[in-house]
C-alpha cells in the first residue's frame, strides 16, 4: 500500500492496519519492521518511536576497541536528539525516551572525542519536554575533573530535573558532595572505584558491589581518605531519596550518619553493602562511634539489609563480621522497620571427607548474631531473611559432598543457631552453593 492511498484512509482504519501488522510480526522482527515504517509512513511515527527509543543502551567495550562502533552510536544519538525537523504534531525524540544506559571504556584521547557529544545528549534529555526517568552512566577510570565543564553542567541539569527518578553513576571518582545537593529521586546508586587495598581480596572477584552514596577517594594505596565532610553542613539536602546503598566504613561513621540523616524523612530502604573495619585503627573506640548512628528518626524506613563477603577463617571479634555485630549491638532501629535482610557470602569452605560434613568456620559467630537479633530493639521486626551463599575454594571440593545435602545441612544449622530467637516464623533461610575455581 502506497503512502498516498494510506493517507486517504480513515484514522481508525490506519490504526487497525498498524495493530494487525504488529500482531503478525514476531517480537524479534518488529523493531526492524517498524524502523522501515518510520521512514515511509508518517502516521506510524509515534508508535515506531515509542517502541524503538523507549529504552536506549550503548554498551559494548569490546566493540569500541575493534571498530569504534559505539562511538558512532553516541554521535548518531546526538544528531537524532538535536534534530529540529520533527513531523508535526509529534514531539521531539527526547519525549519518547524513558531509560538510557551508557557504559563506555575509553582512553583519554577517545573520551575527548565524545565528551562534547555526551554533553549535548545529556542537555537534550534535561529539557522540560524530555520523558527520561532513568539514567545509568558508567564511565570506568574517569575522574570528575577530567570531564568537560559542559558535560558536568549538562549532567547536573539532568540529575536535578523533575522527570528523572532513578540515577546510577559508576566509575566516576572524586564527585564532590555538593553535586548531590537538592536532587529529588526515588533511587540513587553511586558506584565508586574499589579500594586498591581490597582488590586482592577474594570477595572482590566474586561479588564486587561496593555501592556507595559517599564520595570517597580511593586513590591512596595505604588508606581511605574521605572528602571534606564539612561540606555537608552547607545548605541543600537529599530529602526525597527512598533507597540508599552505602559502604559503611566505621572510621567515617560521623560522615555516614550526617549524610543519611538528610534523607531520613522519606528513606524506605537502607542497604549496607560493605562493612570495612580494617582501616579503623582503634577497635576499642569503635562502639562509642557506632552509638552516634541513630536510625530512629528514619520514620519511613521499612527494610534494612546487610551484604557481607566473609572468609570462613575470619575471626569473630574483628573484621567485617565484628563490624556488623558492633553496628547491630549499638544502632537504634526504627519501630516501623519490618524486614532485616542479612546476605552472607562465605568463602573458602571445604567438605570434610572423613567427618562427612561442611567446614565453614567457627559456629560461635552465628550464635552471637542470633543473640544480638534477640535484643529488644529488634522486637518490632516481623521478618529476618538470611541468605547464605557458600563458596567452595574448588569445584572438586564442592562435589566431594552432595550440594543438595550441603544446603540441607546449612538449613538445619541455621534453625539451630537461631532457635532461641523468639517469634515463630520470623526467620526465612535461603542457601546457594557454588565454587570459585572450576579448573581444579
Image (tube, grey):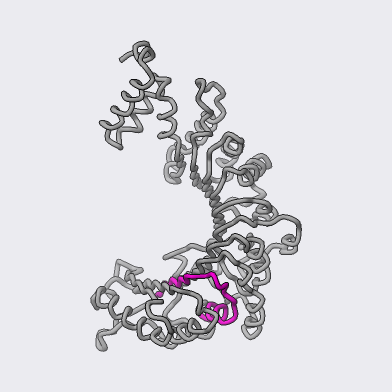
Residue in the image at 53% along x and 34% along y: 94
Q: Is residue 142 left or right of 41 when viewed as pictured?
A: right
Tag count: 0
Q: Quadrant of residue 347?
A: bottom left
Q: Is residue 281 left or right of 100 when viewed as pictured?
A: right
Residue in the image at 30% along x and 37% along y: 27
Q: Position of residue 64 (x, y in %)?
A: 46, 41
Q: Is residue 193 left or right of 429 when viewed as pictured?
A: right
Magenta region, residue range:
321-348
Q: Residue 3 or 36: which is nearer the viewer?
A: 3
Q: Position of residue 7 (x, y in %)?
A: 38, 14
Q: Is residue 403 left or right of 133 when viewed as pictured?
A: left
Q: Quadrant of residue 327?
A: bottom right
Q: Quadrant of the C terminus?
A: bottom left
Q: Position of residue 189 (x, y in %)?
A: 54, 56
Q: Does the magenta run of residues contain 338?
A: yes
Q: Does the magenta run of residues contain 339?
A: yes
Q: Position of residue 228 (x, y in %)?
A: 72, 63
Amino acid at each position: 500500500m502506497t503512502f498516498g492511498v494510506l493517507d486517504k484512509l480513515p484514522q481508525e482504519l490506519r490504526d487497525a492496519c498498524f495493530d494487525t501488522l504488529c500482531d503478525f510480526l514476531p517480537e524479534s522482527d518488529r523493531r526492524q519492521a517498524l524502523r522501515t515504517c518510520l521512514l515511509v509512513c508518517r502516521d506510524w511515527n509515534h508508535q515506531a518511536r515509542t517502541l524503538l527509543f523507549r529504552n536506549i543502551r550503548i554498551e559494548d567495550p569490546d566493540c569500541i576497541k575493534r571498530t569504534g562502533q559505539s562511538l558512532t552510536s553516541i554521535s548518531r544519538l546526538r544528531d537524532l536528539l538535536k534534530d529540529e525537523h520533527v513531523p508535526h504534531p509529534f514531539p521531539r525524540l527526547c519525549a519518547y525516551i524513558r531509560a538510557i544506559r551508557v557504559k563506555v571504556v575509553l582512553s583519554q584521547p577517545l573520551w575527548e572525542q565524545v565528551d562534547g557529544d555526551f554533553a549535548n545528549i545529556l542537555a537534550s534529555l534535561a529539557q522540560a519536554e524530555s520523558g527520561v526517568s532513568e539514567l545509568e552512566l558508567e564511565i570506568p577510570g574517569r575522574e570528575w575533573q577530567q570531564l568537560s565543564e559542559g558535560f558536568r553542567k549538562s549532567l547536573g541539569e539532568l540529575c536535578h530535573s523533575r522527570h528523572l527518578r532513578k540515577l546510577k553513576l559508576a566509575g566516576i571518582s572524586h564527585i564532590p558532595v555538593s553535586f548531590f545537593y537538592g536532587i529529588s529521586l526515588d533511587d540513587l546508586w553511586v558506584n565508586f572505584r574499589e579500594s586498591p587495598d581490597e582488590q586482592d581480596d577474594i570477595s572482590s572477584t566474586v561479588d564486587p558491589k561496593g555501592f556507595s552514596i559517599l564520595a570517597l577517594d580511593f586513590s591512596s594505596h595505604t588508606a581511605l581518605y574521605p572528602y571534606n565532610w564539612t561540606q555537608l553542613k552547607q545548605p541543600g539536602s537529599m530529602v526525597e531519596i527512598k533507597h540508599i546503598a552505602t559502604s559503611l566504613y566505621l572510621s567515617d561513621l560521623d560522615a555516614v550518619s550526617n549524610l543519611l540523616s538528610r534523607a531520613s524523612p522519606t528513606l524506605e530502604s537502607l542497604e549496607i553493602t560493605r562493612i570495612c573495619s580494617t582501616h579503623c585503627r582503634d577497635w576499642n573506640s569503635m562502639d562509642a562511634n557506632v552509638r552516634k548512628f541513630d536510625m530512629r528518626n528514619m520514620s519511613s524506613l521499612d527494610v534494612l539489609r546487610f551484604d557481607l563477603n566473609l572468609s570462613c577463617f575470619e575471626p569473630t571479634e574483628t573484621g567485617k563480621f565484628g563490624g556488623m555485630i558492633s553496628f547491630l549491638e549499638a544502632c537504634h532501629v526504627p519501630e516501623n522497620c519490618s524486614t532485616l535482610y542479612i546476605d552472607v557470602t562465605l568463602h573458602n569452605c571445604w567438605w570434610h571427607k572423613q567427618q562427612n560434613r561442611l567446614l565453614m568456620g567457627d559456629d560461635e559467630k552465628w550464635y552471637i548474631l542470633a543473640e544480638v537479633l534477640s535484643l529488644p530493639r529488634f522486637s518490632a521486626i516481623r521478618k529476618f531473611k538470611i541468605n547464605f551463599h557458600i563458596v567452595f575454594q574448588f569445584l572438586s571440593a564442592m562435589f566431594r559432598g552432595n550440594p543438595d545435602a550441603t544446603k540441607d545441612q546449612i538449613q538445619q544449622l541455621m534453625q539451630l543457631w537461631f532457635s532461641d530467637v523468639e517469634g515463630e516464623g520470623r526467620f526465612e533461610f535461603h542457601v546457594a552453593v557454588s565454587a570459585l575455581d572450576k579448573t581444579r
